[in-house]
Image: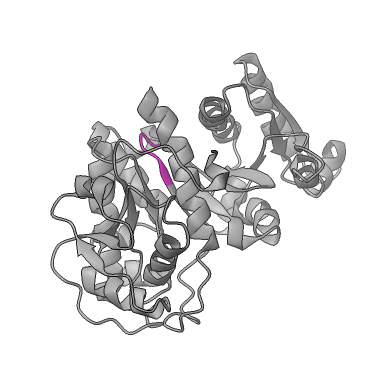
Amino acid sequence: MSAAAGVYPALNKPLAITMGDAAGIGPEIIAKGFAAEPALFAGCFVAGDAQAMRQASALAGRMPAWPVVELSDPAEALSAPPGCLPVFQIGAALGPVAYGQVSAAAGHFAGQCVQWAAHEALQGALAGLVTAPLHKLALSEAGPPFDSYPGHTEMLQALAAAHAGTRVDLMPVRMMLANPQLRVVLVSIHMALRQAIEAVTTARVLETILITDRALRAALGRAPRIAVAGLNPHAGEGGLFGSEDLDIIAPAIAQAQALGCNASGPWPPDTVFMQARASAQGPGFFDVVVAMYHDQGLIPVKYLGVEEGVNLTLGLPLVRTSPDHGTAFDIAGRGCADPASLICAVRMARQWALPQAAA
């Protein structure tokens, strides 16, 4: 039987799911994910707080709630019995946290979970990690070192660079957002729009294309068809609406092509995502779109369905995925959070981890 039928190849290393901010929906969607797809979550464990996960299990609406099994070693997740939530306690117990409220304590604990899981993955002890949502303000209020990171991506990049003994700028990473219909990789992520436009340089666009090519070439087993979106309306219309597409983006594409990448563009950003979109009739014309800035790429992906969206960090020496949504403080604690995006993130992490493990 195939993975789609509910049978998955066994992991040879455990897969960590970091708990995220305890004041948000992270613990709840993790508990619901284990209950909804037990075969998919086999070999996974929660890097987090045992009591927070007990509370989340009860919140998930199971009668009785799934028991939390505290692991003394993450490797025990590979043999954890069905019908339980395996949790590896990160540091001291978190203590009570109010749902839907920014908490420096919750932000600090969430950061600790990511820090621990990244270290273990970089040491080769984990198949990868799936990160439940952080709250950026809580992370900022947590203080050093977490207040220096805008989010997961930047934190993981810094941790990977430190592990490799190199500078952060020599460990370039990119964010890929994917759902069953569309993959998008971003040239820049969390910065003001004015700064994001300034970040569109030939070197950075080329670097993004090369990172995308390496990652998807390994995943697909062939050279991916990479569409590069323009920056300006109609990709500049031959220079009428700005020169960046001709002077900055086009040279990066030409250099990527000379290095063996199947890249093309710059394509008008108002139509390229439709060309790349897969449908019931077949795959899109492109395997992935390189977008110039955060909202240009994320709006089409999220419009097609946040519930199936997955964030995957490319360029790291580890597998990392996450749901394509935030902490949802407005519904935290109500028991109504949808685990679909987390389930998709676990599925993608397994797909990307297993080829690496075989290699």
Where is residue 188 shown, x and y percent of the image? Answer: 55, 47
**Which residues, given as a range, are shown in magenta?**
316-320
Which percent across, then down, holds residue 89? 19, 62
User: Which coloring applies here?
Assistant: one colour
**Within the magenta stretch, is there residue 317?**
yes
Q: Does the stretch in magenta take in 145?
A: no
| Quarter containing the N terminus | top right
Magenta-colored segment: predominant secondary structure? loop
| Residue 324 at least partly seen | no
- The residue that appears at 59% across and 31% down in the rendered structure is 209
Relative image position of residue 185 (x, y in whole percent): 59, 42
Q: x, y percentage for residue 40?
A: 44, 50
- 282 is higher (above) or lower (below) than 213: below
Of 64 and 320, which appears nearest the observer?
64
Number of marks:
0
User: Which residue lies at the image location 38% right of the left edge and 25% below the top edge?
Assistant: 358
Res. 123 image quadrant:
top left
Q: Quadrant of residue 131?
A: bottom left
Question: Looking at the image, which residue is at 30% across and 35% down?
Answer: 12
